[in-house]
Amino acid sequence: MLHAKKVLLAALLAVSAAAANAVEVNASVGDEFQHIDGNAALLGIDMSADWTHNDHKGEVGGVGVGIKLPVPVVDAALGIKAVYLSPKHQDTEYAAALGGRLTIPLGEHFAVYGSAYYAPEGFASGNVKSFTDTAIGVRWNVIKPLSIDVGYRYTAIDRDHGDKISIADGIYGGLGVRF
């Protein structure tokens, strides 16, 4: 578990170093879960790393790569991420999740955003039937590098035999830095 956190931290730092002019890092807290993610873009390539932790249910982390879409006004990307799944009292598993993210500015200080990644049974190891990670929210850009987020996150692992482990399922608040 500690090893996975070190790998994700190293990935966040590598993403930051690779794209020093287009980096964003967000941290958020919800009821029983914490989440941190980093995103960077370099030459049309979108790189990301994230980690979601729940004291009672376990944690998941991912490192991804994608293509930024050339859509005017909005920030959009589609890609794939390798996901580490570590639910409490269960075997550690892995998945390759497909998905993307979208941010739509609403004037100078506000934006709505969303992300969704999904791994079906064929893209996951062991007893994982599917993996889902989604978020939707509103961002207030308080001052140039600092933002405040409010949203809803759902991160779940569906396992064989009907077990569903919701690592995150609820409203969150967070802070972000962009530079």
Image (cartoon, rainbow, N blue to C red):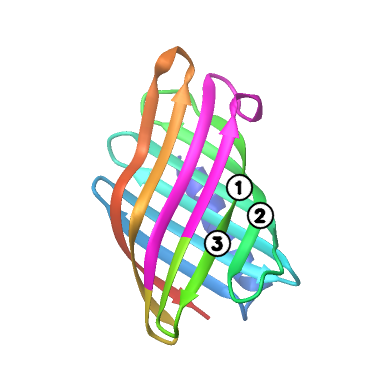
The residue carrying mark 1 is 99
- Residues under numbered marks 3 and 1 in contact, where contact means CB atoms less than 8 Å apart: no
Q: Nearer the viewer, residue 93 or 137?
A: 137
Q: Give the x, y percent position of residue 176.
A: 41, 71
**Which residue appears at 40% of the width and 83% of the height?**
109
Answer above or below: position of 29 versus 81. Answer: below
| Number of numbered discs on residues | 3
The Cα atoms of the two marked residues, 2 and 1, are separated by: 6 Å
Image quadrant assignment for residue 138: bottom left
Q: For the residue labelled by badge 3, is the local secondary structure a helix, a strand or a loop?
A: strand
Q: Which amino acid lies under the numbered mark 1 shown in the image of this protein? A: Gly
Q: Nearer the viewer, residue 98 or 6?
A: 98
- Magenta extent: 114-139
**Which residue appears at 37% of the width and 29% of the height?**
165
Q: Which residue is at the far left?
A: 31
Q: For the residue labelled by badge 1, is the local secondary structure a helix, a strand or a loop?
A: strand
Q: Image quadrant for the N terminus?
A: top left
The Cα atoms of the two marked residues, 3 and 1, are separated by: 10 Å
Residue 102 tag number:
3
